[in-house]
Image (tube, grey):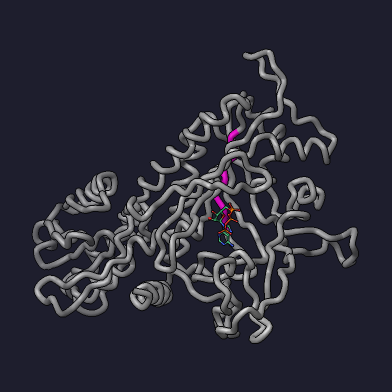
Amino acid sequence: MAKKENKTMNELVALCKRRGYIFQSSEIYGGVASTYDYGPLGVELKRNLKELWWREMVQLRSDIEGIDSAIIMHPKVWIASGHVDEFVDPLVECKECHRRFKADDLATVEQCPVCGSKDSFTEPKLFHLLFQTYMGPVQSEENKAYLRPETAQGIYVNFENVRTPARQKLPFGIAQIGKAFRNEITPGNFTFRTREFEQMEMQFFVHPGEADEWFDYWKEERRKWYSSLGFSMENLTFHVHEKLAHYARAAIDIEYDFPFGRSELEGIHNRGNFDLSRHQEFSGKSFEYFDQARDEKYIPYIIETSGGVDRCLLALLVDALVEEPEEGDPNKTRTVLKLHPRLAPTKAGIFPLVNRDGMPEMAKKIESELREKFMVFYDDGGSIGRRYRRQDEAGTPFCITIDGQSLEDGTVTIRERDTMVQVRVAIDAIAGMIDKYTDEWRRDGGLSI
Ligand code: ATP
């Protein structure tokens, strides 16, 4: 079992490098531990994912506003938030091999997972997860600053700056996508846990009496969103937290069954009025809200949905990666990334059957027309079969081939990635067909062009 699981992650990592999705950062210098760069396909997938989230959470709703706050904030923010005091993980060291582990991870094992030595760990020591830097040229205590470990605090401190000009009344939310940094002790599992990552966070401000209701509402909304991305829902679990973080009143994690184990993609938390009360206390500015409808003053409760862009993207790739027997030759397999067409970096591959007789010219014309609407990829290298395989691996949902008949009657063949069904259509019907199929696509197939 373990062998098969490793193989899947190794295959995915290799495919990501081969197709230009994700690769090791600073590779020519030997790489930096657990930092990755997104290549041409990776950056498109990431943009598509973030745009879908933004559209769903901000643009389609009148009760959520967007924000883009700074990474470096006033150091007091992180004292008020509790990060300076609480954002620590207890760490133990193996006395034999000197490798360090999170104490929590070793709670049930007595042996060093690396060297096998028994009962030889140091006492747990607290390890700070905040990235520290200095503002200005002098590296002194008063110039100390932190890279934000979450985007949420940029939302809390700007509660009034957003609410007043947007003329929002409770309940309403503020959403943000941006980078966060944590000096993780045990980064790993490819892009699952890194020290630099992106978050998609939304903080919904509510009357304390309505917090439970909104918590349930957001749980369901977020479930629907993951389903709309095309995830196989049997791979997703809602894990209810018994043990709560210092700020939370209720917490649920949305977890995905990765090859390396079930792990968190997003947290949904009822944070009570902890955050706004703390910022009120530390800044001296009031965060009390006057609720006209109720004729009541209170500090709002917050329901947060806090997801990772990179983790969601990794789960999407794991979920989409399929190896299946080739039709006609069961000894051979084809590798396909069955990404939702809405997320797929390239929507269509465009192939002239041969490089002569006017086919490349016609294919180039179709390419430039479609490029106005979608990302497309022109490929005239190698056999059609090989060109299909390359696009299957890249997750491209359609391949359009221009052949001899195209020159005569203005039709092309379109081949669909998942079913490999091919149909002939008129050139001016291609874009409409791609749109329709994208809207109707389902993870379990059953739909063909
Ligand atoms: P974990 O328990 O895995 O460390 P967490 O509970 O600390 O995660 P939160 O603080 O709730 O995570 O952060 C919200 C989201 O941000 C997570 O669900 C995850 O998707 C993402 N995230 C957090 N830490 C990392 C990281 N080191 N690398 C990539 N994504 C991360």
Quarter of the image with the N terminus is bottom left
Answer whether residue 44 is visible to the viewer in this image.
Answer: no
Q: Nearer the viewer, residue 441 or 348?
A: 441
- Give the residue displayed 40% in from the left and 60% down from the top: 257
Magenta region, residue range: 198-204
Question: Residue 296: percent from the left, percent from the top?
Answer: 69, 16
Left or right of residue 283: residue 191: left
Left or right of residue 31: residue 59: left
Snapshot quadrant of residue 209: top right
Total count of labels = 0
- Give the residue displayed 43% in from the left and 64% down from the top: 261
Answer whether residue 338 is visible to the viewer in this image.
Answer: yes
Q: Is residue 326 above or below residue 363?
A: below
Q: Nearer the viewer, residue 78 or 349?
A: 78
Q: Is residue 242 above or below residue 337?
A: above
Snapshot quadrant of residue 341: bottom left
Q: Nearer the viewer, residue 375 or 420?
A: 420
Question: Residue 155: percent from the left, percent from the top?
Answer: 66, 42
Helix, strand or loop: magenta stretch: strand
Ligand 1 shows up in the quarter that is bottom right
Left or right of residue 165: residue 351: left
Q: Is residue 392 above or below residue 7?
A: above
Residue 167 falls within the magenta-colored stretch: no
Q: Nearer the viewer, residue 342 or 325?
A: 325
Residue 199 falls within the magenta-colored stretch: yes
Question: Residue 62: percent from the left, percent from the top?
Answer: 52, 29
Question: Residue 28: percent from the left, percent from the top?
Answer: 56, 84
- Give the residue displayed 64% in from the left and 67% down from the top: 103
